[in-house]
Image (spheres, rainbow, N blue to C red):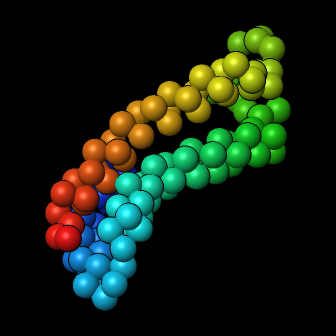
Amino acid sequence: MLVLTAAVDRNRRAEDLSALRLQGLGRREARGAVLWAYPWLVILGVTAGMAVALAGWALTGWALPLAGLNPPPLPFPGRPGVISLTLTGGALLAVLLAAAIPAARAVLRKLSY
């Protein structure tokens, strides 16, 4: 989704920032807006996604069926561990930032100063 958003948004965003540059927006501010927009989107998205996942688990985790109508006699799943949540969040951040940073740089290359 991030790659699609970046691909669709790239030209329009470069045009908007170029127009703002003509109206007096500083080079440093334009560069900062371009380079930090997608990474912040990723950071906030991963944080919100993890929070929603934890809330969903807190509301329904105790009642999740294990396997169909006649589940085997297995114990209910335990709480998500801190280590697994940290590793999952870190892996998501790494993968999505690996897509977000080149997308931001592509917008920066299209930006006419």
Q: Is residue 10 left or right of residue 98?
A: left
Q: Is residue 77 visible?
A: yes
Q: On screen, 87 above or below 21?
A: above
Q: Nearer the viewer, residue 112 or 105?
A: 112
Single out the residue that lies furthest toward the bottom: 23
Q: Is residue 63 left or right of residue 42?
A: right
Please tell me how many numbered marks the rendered image carries: 0
Q: Percent position (x, y) of residue 51?
A: 70, 46
Q: Is residue 106 left or right of residue 85?
A: left
Q: On screen, 43 above or below 107?
A: above
Q: Nearer the viewer, residue 16 or 71?
A: 16
Q: Quadrant of residue 58?
A: top right
- Residue under the point 36% across and 36% down: 98
Q: Percent position (x, y) of residue 84?
A: 66, 21
- Residue under the point 29% across and 79% down: 21
Q: Is residue 76 left or right of residue 67?
A: right
Q: On screen, 49 above or below 111?
A: above
- Residue under the point 49% across and 55% down: 41
- Residue under the point 32% across and 68% down: 27
Q: Percent position (x, y) of residue 102?
A: 28, 45
Q: Percent position (x, y) of residue 39?
A: 45, 49
Indicate the quadrant containing the C terminus: top left, top right, bottom left or bottom right. Answer: bottom left
Q: Quadrant of residue 109?
A: bottom left
Q: Is residue 70 visible?
A: no
Q: Quadrant of residue 14?
A: bottom left
Q: Nearer the viewer, residue 56 or 31?
A: 31
Q: On screen, 65 above or below 56?
A: above
